[in-house]
Image (cartoon, grey):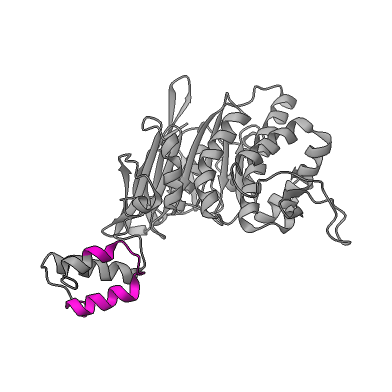
Amino acid sequence: MLLSIHAHNVSALGEVTFEPAERVTLVTGENGLGKTLLLDLAWFAATGGNTARAALTPRRPGDGAATIRYTASVADGVTSTVDERFDARTWRWERDSTPWATGLVVYAHADGAFDVWDFMRTARHVSYDSPDVRRIEHRFALTPGDVWDGLTRDGRVLCNGLLRDWATWQFQRPDVFARFARALARLSEGLDESLLPGTPQRVSPDDARDIPTLRLPYGEVPVSLCSAGMRRVLALAYIIVWTFDEHRAAAQLMGEKPLEDLVLLVDEVEAHLHPRWQRLLLPALLAVLDELAPSVHAQVIATTHAPLVLASIEPHFSPARDRVLHLARAGAGVELTDLPWSPQGDAVNWLVSESFGLRQARSIEAEQAIEAAEAFMRGEPCPAPLDQRDAIHEALRAALPDHDHFWPRWLVRSGAVA
């Protein structure tokens, strides 16, 4: 389990200390401040200094050496700390000691790509004592196309892909398919369109594969023709089940005991998803992980821009095991703040909380008109052009519907009605 990461002069973050919670860590903040970079740092630390698709490089040459220190709980309360320093001459990270890197790590990128690290299947190819090791190669780097169609490298089939594995599981490996079907059911529980597997079918005379289908209210639909939101959820379910299944198979072949730690990194949990799915996905992912491998400790670190994601976790949030962090501008750099847990009750309240920082959960024009109206009612001066009652009234008429709850207060307090 990751305990802490301290980065100095690294990429856009500059200097930051990141301490993930034991179970769920949610990171909020505006675009461009480095939320994805925090996930890149978590991947770097959880895999023992292996970079994901985006390389971690120095921020500014004049700010001193780029360094990363990461600490993890390895086993039975034992912790391990590794210091990494970026060597600008060789343009790579150099470590002071052998890292642990003994778990499973899944990184779900916002664009549909995945990185997967499995100590048994990838780290055995890494010589940590060799200064020439190219760490970035020792992972399963799956593009969105690879997730669906498979990944090969040097003639080796590293991943069959969702389309082939789905069909194989459905007809030849009922135990794995049952786990996959349960994961799909969990990830669509209570929705109008549940993810129920149908019968594979051909979709083109130019494609010899039988494509898996979903049973939807309007018939069986090939998964290759599903919406972006459904494909995102299908890919998440597939990669999680595939990671566990392939890890167990490798452990059996090697005569080893399966590992008991998983770090799941998810960038923009809500990507492509309807609000119904936004409020379902994170609790459902936790349930999927618990059911797939009850003995495995899963640490989930995710970024989000969606207030419904935070609202969805309220019934499941444990202040002792979970954390909400906020990334914000601080002078020329950024600051990562640990927000005290405070349930907001609904998405609107989350929007105006510290996590998202809106003054009003409305359009910009409505927010400006209401802020001017509030100042006018308090007897405070208002900047032009909203510096007179009539101008404010017209702005409110243009921005608010007739049934808006703000109208009665404004009409009485402003003197517009007696």
**Numbered marks: total:** 0
Q: Is residue 393 visible?
A: yes
Residue 12 counted in the magenta span: no
Pick whichever, 155 or 174, lies toward us. 174
Pick whichever, 119 or 379, lies toward us. 379
Is 68 situated above or below 88? above
For this orientation, the residue located farthest to the top is 76
Query: Does residue 388 appear left or right of residue 67 in this picture?
Result: left
Q: Which residues are magenta?
A: 385-409
Pick whichever, 75 or 348, lies toward us. 348
Task: Find residue 24 and report its horizontal and vertical position in percent.
Answer: 45, 37
Residue at 52% over, 46% down: 266
Task: Find residue 395 and report its horizontal and vertical position in percent.
Answer: 28, 76
Query: Does residue 256 appear left or right of residue 310 in this picture?
Result: right
Pick whichever, 110 or 104, lies toward us. 110
Residue at 24% over, 75% down: 393
Q: Is residue 87 visible?
A: no
